[in-house]
Image: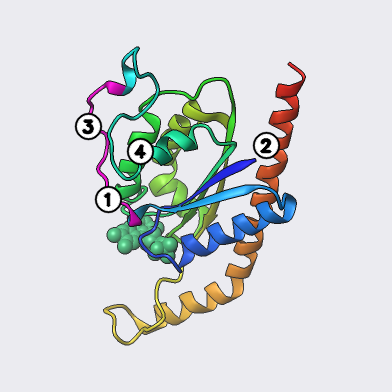
Amino acid sequence: MKIYAINASPRKNWNSAKLLEGFVKGVKEENPDAEVEVINIYDYDFKGCRSCFACKLKATPNQCMIKDSIQQFLIDIRKGDGLVFASPVYYFDQPGYFRAFMERLLYPGPVKGKAIPVTAIYSMNATSEAEYQEYMGDHFKFTHMMIQNCFHGPLKELKVFDSFQREDSDAYQASKSNHVAKKERYEREFPGHLENAFNAGREMVKEIRAIQAAEATK
Ligand SMILES: Cc1cc2nc3c(=O)[nH]c(=O)nc-3n(C[C@H](O)[C@H](O)[C@H](O)COP(=O)(O)O)c2cc1C
């Protein structure tokens, strides 16, 4: 069982990274033999889709043909059993660099012959589900629809609101009271979010097992 875990934040020790780590722990708890490959996309130098259509050629179907540092990941993820990404929200969307990654992953078209469950984890400044729905809900609905069209499996969302963004309040141009309130909420709620991520990891293993069992009876 192979699961690809993408950290779509440039920060390797903050909200997205920690939530992803919680998810991976859950996977390992449920299935110690599961192989998990963590990809910090900002470690790689790449650009988005070039619209070359090589992935649409009959000779090289369903494969991004841009030869660069992420090409092999794009090929491998489509052969994996599960995909999870943890991402910040940048301007009501996934970060541009992650969008570039996703263009390359999705444009080669739907994966063939298998269903791959996906978990989408987001951390954001927005403070509630209502705020998320008002500003990002419609947009993410379409993004997730495209992801599901490609991977066919269930897509689960896990959202963390009002994320805590830095330790030092005095050095930054933001109100101290806001910083303190965020920190308090973070300390109160983040352990619960980590637990949710952990449980989502366990859940993905169960989903993969169910998909594999159904495949075996065909
Ligand atoms: C360039 C930039 C744009 C952002 N835009 C939004 C936004 O539109 N909505 C929001 O809720 N949070 C926004 N944020 C806040 C981040 O989503 C939030 O801090 C997130 O938890 C960071 O994740 P990380 O700690 O994993 O890097 C933005 C942050 C940055 C740096």
Q: CA distance from mark 3 to mark 2?
A: 33 Å
Residue at disc 3, secondary structure: loop
x, y percentage for residue 208?
A: 67, 36
Q: Nearer the viewer, mark 1 or mark 3?
A: 1
Give the amino acid at mark 4. Gln
- Is disc 2 surrounded by few (<14), some (14 to 19) or many (20+) residues within 10 Å? many
The residue drawn where x is 57% and y is 20% is 113
Whether residue 201 can be seen here: yes
Q: Are marks 3 and 2 in contact (CB under 8 Å)?
A: no
The residue drawn where x is 37% and y is 52% is 41
The quadrant in which residue 173 appears is bottom left
Start and end of the magenta stretch?
43-54
Q: Are marks 1 and 3 in contact (CB under 8 Å)?
A: no
Give the amino acid at mark 2. Ile
Residue at disc 2, secondary structure: helix
Q: Nearer the viewer, mark 2 or mark 1?
A: 1
x, y percentage for residue 67?
A: 28, 36
- Is disc 3 surrounded by few (<14), some (14 to 19) or many (20+) residues within 10 Å? few
Q: Are marks 1 and 4 in contact (CB under 8 Å)?
A: no
What label sits on residue 50 in the rendered view? 3
Residue placed most toward the observer, 175 or 96 = 96
Q: Are marks 3 and 4 in contact (CB under 8 Å)?
A: no
The residue drawn where x is 48% and y is 26% is 149
First in residue order: circle 2 vs circle 1: 1
Which residue does the numbered mark 2 point to in the structure image? 208
First in residue order: circle 4 vs circle 2: 4
Which residue does the numbered mark 4 point to in the structure image? 71
